[in-house]
């Protein structure tokens, strides 16, 4: 008994431990989320303050540097406005006149006064564009090798309408970094020269150092081309250009040289730094301020450590409190466990004793109610089991009788199914034969229709052929008539050719006689001497005409002979054509008679085929009706067969079902006995 109590006590303690562990997990999750959100919010505020501070510092430093050089810019403008210097550059035309010019002394006094006004001014000088010389305070005059146009500042200063700042450089004379501030002196559009101040940059490091941030923060300054003018690392000054450096700092340098303003987080020498940068408008330079991220967020890290410590202590206190409270509230659990173990063995007689009004007391009350309800249910089930056993025995007897009857119904139904199946097969065979016969009749009808159509077409073509032959016969008659006319005309042409030939012969004879006469006349004229010369000329002309007439007569005779030859050939051909036309007419007459008989035969065949086609169509229609009727009979038979099969199947299923009912009834009876035996394990007050 004591061992059980110790075991129960350990279980109650384990619940307290579990609650404490769950609470610990919840506290860790909640505190972690809260801490992360708090860290993120605090970090954003801190980073915002850092960025704002860096931006303010870089802008203020840029303004300070800008104001320092803006002052020198204003001084350069004032010097350029000195009329004595303007007059001096107008009158001093060469280096030889530099010190002898009447304005030289007053200009030199002005330059010496300006140098004394500010310790940062190393020298003030004036350069003549026309005279190609340079003078400075303390009577400085450059040597003869001075060439103003070869100076590196000449072109940029000439292109600048206002004040021009040179890039800082290490001066060999002073041994310091110097910057020249210069501006043009003009007479209208003509540049007379330049006035300039060489400035020491000694104050610049002190100014830059005054804007240091934190312990390890620093500031830096670059020129317009990126040359580092100030940096805590002296090795970089005037020796490196910030845009040429690799990594983030090089990219920042490129932005600074184009006059951008901003704040970025950059990797510098394996250290992450916040870098703010801002331009210096007066010189085109740019200043930057830097603060290591680790130093900037040092306060945040301390804050996080304190938060973690606070959350840890608070969480432990909560866990201890919850553990003690849970242990106090769970002290009634051992008794509840003891009663529940007795219930597990089937003993339903013990009851719990509620000792509080909290959830555990309510659980004890509910368990007692559950035990009472379960006891009542067990008693009711026991009574029902006895009734179930008796009912299952009756059900077994009834199911056996039903099974016998169902078996007889199934046997009768199987015989009906076999008869219906034979009837269905006969109907299907008859329907199939009728369909084949209908298909054959339909093909015959289609063939008869095709023959009728082809016969009608052939009859039409025969009529058309007969008509064409009749037209050909008519055309042959017209050709025969035309050939006869042409033949007669050719005969006339032959007769005319003969007449023309006779005329040509007569003309030829006349020409020969005329030629003889002209010859005699020529002889007589020769005898007559001088008196017969005129007559001799006429005789000569007559002779020539007779010769030409004889020549033309010969040509005409040749042409007439050719015409006669062609005419005789044409006459022969026309005679042969008349014979051929007669033969063609006889052949066409014979063909016309044949086509006429063919046409009559085609019409007769077409009429007979039409009658056959009509009869075949009627047979096809009747066959289709018979086929449809056989199909209906087949479908009805199939339906009867399916219904009969359904009845047989239902009968078999019913038989099987009755067997199952019988088996289930037996099983149910056995289960009722087993349940009755099992209920005896429960101990009740009944």
Image: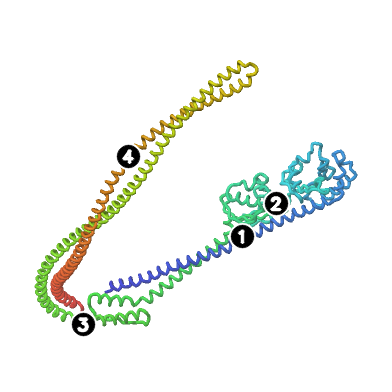
State which tag comes first along the sequence, 3 or 2: 2
In terms of depth relative to the viewer, which is nearer, 242 or 613? 613
Q: Are marks 2 and 1 in contact (CB under 8 Å)?
A: no
* Residue 524 drawn above or below residue 573: above
State which tag comes first along the sequence, 1 or 4: 1
Residue 580 numbered tag: 4
Between label 2 and label 1, give the one nearer the viewer. 2
Residue 430: give x, y in percent of width and height. Answer: 15, 63
Q: Secondary structure at mark 2?
A: loop
Between label 3 and label 2, give the one nearer the viewer. 2
Query: How crowded is the residue under tag 4: few (<14 C-alpha within 10 Å), some, or many (20+)?
Result: some
Residue 284 numbered tag: 2
State which tag comes first along the sequence, 4 or 2: 2
Q: Quadrant of residue 414?
A: bottom left
In terms of depth relative to the viewer, which is nearer, 337 or 618? 618
In terms of depth relative to the viewer, which is nearer, 95 or 53? 95
Residue displayed at 39% across by 33% down: 568
Residue 380 numbered tag: 3
State which tag comes first along the sequence, 1 or 3: 1
Residue extending furthest right? 102
Residue 125 seen from this side: no
Q: Residues under labels 4 and 2: Cα distance?
A: 122 Å
Residue displayed at 39% across by 74% down: 326
Q: Residues under labels 1 and 4: Cα distance?
A: 126 Å
Q: Residues under labels 4 and 3: Cα distance?
A: 134 Å
């Amino acid at each position: 008994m004591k061992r059980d109590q110790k075991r129960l006590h350990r279980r109650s303690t384990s619940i307290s431990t579990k609650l404490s562990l769950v609470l610990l997990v919840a506290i860790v999750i909640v505190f972690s989320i809260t801490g992360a959100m708090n860290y993120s919010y605090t970090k954003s505020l801190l980073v915002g303050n850092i960025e704002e501070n860096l931006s303010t510092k870089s802008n203020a430093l840029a303004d300070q540097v800008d104001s320092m050089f803006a002052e020198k810019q204003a001084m350069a403008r004032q010097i350029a406005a000195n009329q004595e210097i303007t007059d001096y550059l107008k009158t001093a035309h060469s280096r030889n006149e530099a010190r002898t010019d009447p304005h030289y002394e007053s200009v030199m006094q002005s330059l010496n006064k300006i140098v004394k006004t500010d310790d940062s001014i190393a020298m003030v000088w004036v350069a003549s564009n026309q005279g190609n010389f340079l003078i400075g305070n303390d009577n400085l005059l450059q040597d003869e090798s001075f060439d103003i146009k070869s100076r590196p500042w000449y072109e940029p200063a000439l292109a600048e309408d206002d004040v021009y700042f040179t890039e800082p450089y290490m001066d060999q004379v002073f041994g310091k970094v110097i910057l020249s501030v210069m501006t043009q002196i003009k007479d209208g559009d003509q540049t007379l020269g330049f006035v300039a101040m060489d400035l020491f940059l000694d104050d610049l490091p002190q100014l830059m150092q005054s804007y240091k941030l934190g312990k390890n923060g620093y500031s830096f300054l670059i020129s317009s081309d990126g040359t580092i003018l100030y940096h805590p690392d002296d090795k970089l000054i005037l020796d490196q250009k910030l845009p040429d450096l690799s990594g983030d700092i090089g990219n920042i340098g490129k932005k600074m040289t184009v006059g951008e303003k901003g704040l970025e987080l950059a990797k510098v020498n394996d250290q992450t730094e916040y870098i703010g940068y801002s331009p210096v408008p007066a010189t085109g330079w740019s200043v930057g301020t830097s603060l290591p991220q680790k130093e900037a967020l040092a306060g945040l890290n301390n804050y996080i450590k304190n938060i973690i410590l606070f959350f840890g202590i608070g969480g432990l206190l909560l866990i201890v409190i919850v553990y003690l409270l849970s242990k106090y509230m769970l002290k009634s659990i051992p008794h509840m466990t003891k009663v529940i173990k007795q219930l597990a063995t089937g003993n339903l007689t013990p009851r719990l004793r509620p000792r509080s009004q909290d959830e555990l007391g309510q659980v004890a009350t509910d368990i007692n109610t559950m035990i009472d309800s379960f006891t009542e249910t067990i008693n009711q089930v026991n009574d029902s089991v006895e009734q179930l056993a008796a009912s299952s025995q009756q059900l077994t007897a009834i199911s056996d009788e039903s099974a016998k009857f169902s078996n007889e119904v199934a046997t009768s139904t199987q015989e009906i199914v076999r008869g219906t199946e034979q009837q269905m097969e006969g109907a299907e065979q008859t329907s199939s034969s009728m369909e084949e016969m209908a298909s054959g009749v339909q093909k015959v009808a289609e063939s008869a229709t095709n023959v009728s159509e082809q016969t009608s077409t052939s009859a039409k073509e025969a009529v058309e052929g007969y008509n064409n032959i009749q037209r050909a016969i008519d055309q042959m008659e017209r050709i025969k008539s035309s050939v006869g006319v042409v033949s007669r005309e050719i005969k006339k042409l032959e007769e005319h050719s003969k007449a023309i030939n006779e005329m040509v012969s007569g003309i030829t004879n006349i020409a020969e006689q005329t030629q003889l006469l002209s010859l005699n006349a020529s002889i007589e004229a020769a005898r007559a001497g001088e008196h017969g010369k005129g007559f001799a000329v006429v005789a000569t002309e007559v002779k020539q005409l007779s010769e030409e007439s004889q020549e033309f007569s010969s040509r005409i005779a040749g042409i007439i002979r050719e015409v006669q030859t062609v005419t005789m050939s044409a006459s022969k051909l026309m005679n042969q054509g008349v014979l051929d036309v007669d033969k063609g007419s006889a052949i066409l007459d014979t063909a016309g008679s044949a086509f006429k008989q063919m046409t009559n035969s085609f019409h007769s065949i077409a009429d007979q085929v039409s009658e056959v086609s009509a009869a075949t169509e009627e047979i096809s229609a009747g066959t289709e009706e018979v086929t449809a009727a056989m199909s209906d009979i087949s479908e009805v038979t199939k339906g009867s067969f399916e219904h009969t099969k359904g009845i047989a199947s239902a009968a078999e299923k019913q038989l099987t079902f009755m067997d199952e009912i019988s088996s289930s009834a037996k099983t149910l009876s056995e289960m009722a006995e087993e349940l009755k035996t099992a209920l005896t394990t429960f101990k009740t007050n009944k």
